[in-house]
Amino acid sequence: MPDTPPFARPDAALLALRPAIAGQPAPLPTPDTVADFQHQVLRPLLKLQHPVLLATIADVALDYRLPLARPQTELSAALTELLARNARLRATITGLVVGQFTQTELAFYRPHRSELNRRLLDLAQQRILNSLAELRQLTTDQP
């Protein structure tokens, strides 16, 4: 058994899971700015967690009896409002991504948490609103 602290993260394994994003430059070892972090860390992690993100939103939509058969503009407005008002949902979405950070990324995230959470939630909202058909399918597949 290697001599590693009990809190050591499998950083190499976490990085290996991340999908590449077309047109994205090669990531720097450590992002220098919040914008770099957004593009090099948050976007790939949201892409990785996309199915989990949509399943989470589908479950919340069912719990709140959100009628997903609404026209797209009404549904977009309802989901935007849900994401704006539901602190527990925002915390869950944030946790889906932050749980995939490496130790170095977590060290960068902590002092920039407020700005990065805002950017993360904006990106997540865009992904959700661009995936309404998938979201509707997830809610109709429920037993």
Image (spheres, grey):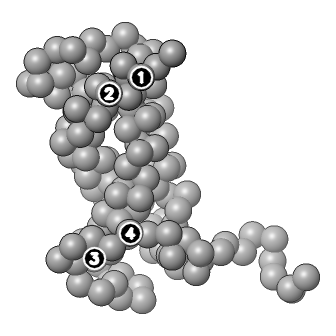
Taking the spot 86% from the left edge, 86% from the top edge, the residue there is: 3
Give the labeled residue for mark 2: 137
Q: Please name the amino acid that badge 4 sits on.
A: Pro
Quick one: label 3, few (<14), some, or many (20+) residues within 10 Å?
some
Give the labeled residue for mark 1: 141
Taking the spot 21% from the left edge, 14% from the top edge, the residue there is: 69
Quick one: label 2, few (<14), some, or many (20+) residues within 10 Å?
few
Give the labeled residue for mark 4: 19
- Quarter-of-image position of residue 53: top left
Taking the spot 41% from the left edge, 59% from the top edge, the residue there is: 48
Give the labeled residue for mark 3: 36
Earlier in the chain: of badge 3 and badge 2, it is 3
Earlier in the chain: of badge 1 and badge 3, it is 3
The answer to whether residue 30 is above or below residue 78 is below
In front of the other: label 4 or label 1?
1
How far apart are the alpha carbons under marks 3 and 2?
Answer: 34 Å
